[in-house]
Amino acid sequence: MSHAKTGFVPVLHFRKRQKREVSNLSPESSMAGMETVIVSAEETIEMVSDTLQKRYPSTVFAVRLEDTVEHMDDICGLDVIWIDGPSRDRVEDLVERFQGVKWDPATGALKSRSHYAVTPEGNLVRVVFNVDYIFCDGPMLAASP
């Protein structure tokens, strides 16, 4: 089963963890008090790069922050650039799971995305990627073999 389809991302891949309690959930919610793992923008870059290289080992990708992130509340975007190889749609589908927000083209609204993972101990945690969006700049069509 694909992690991209389920919204689950293995926590085992997170090297640097910051933890905090989810405070914006009501006490009657089953997720109140759930541990939250915050993945920094820099760590997300590493995860995106690793994911792309494992899936498309013969393609060279450049993954970088659009702007320097000074505070966690700053809007943060990543650029993924490549010349040949997979189509833009394929790369977007692969890295979409690392975005912290989802854009609704019908309304123009940005909505927070929830990501969840299961720890090695079997606990469900909320995962927050400190990357709001990922802009993919590569070929519209896949390169010919």
Image: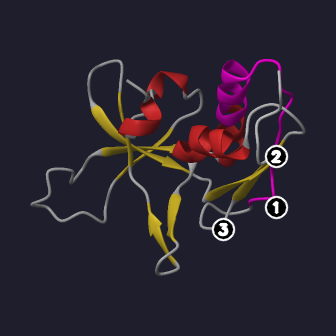
Q: Spot the residue most to the front.
A: 144
What segment is highlighted magenta in the picture?
A: 47-69
Precedes in sequence: disc 2 or disc 1: 1
Precedes in sequence: disc 3 or disc 2: 3
Return the residue at label 1: 67
Q: Position of residue 102 (x, y in %)?
A: 50, 62
Residue drawn at x 56%, y 44% is 98
Where is the C terminus found, in terms of image quarters?
top right
Q: Tag 2's secondary structure?
A: loop
- Residue 21 visible in image: yes
Q: Tag 3's secondary structure?
A: loop
The answer to which of 4 and 17 lies nearer the viewer is 4
Q: Say whether residue 103 is magenta.
A: no
Q: Real-space Cα distance between discs 3 and 1?
A: 10 Å
Say which amino acid is labelled 2.
Gly
Q: Spot the residue most to the bottom.
A: 107
Say which amino acid is labelled 1.
Asp
Instruction: Please state if 115 lies on the left or on the right of 94 as rendered.
Output: left
Return the residue at label 3: 74
- Checking the image for residue 138, the label placed there is 2
- Residue 39 visible in image: no
Q: Real-space Cα distance between discs 2 and 1?
A: 20 Å
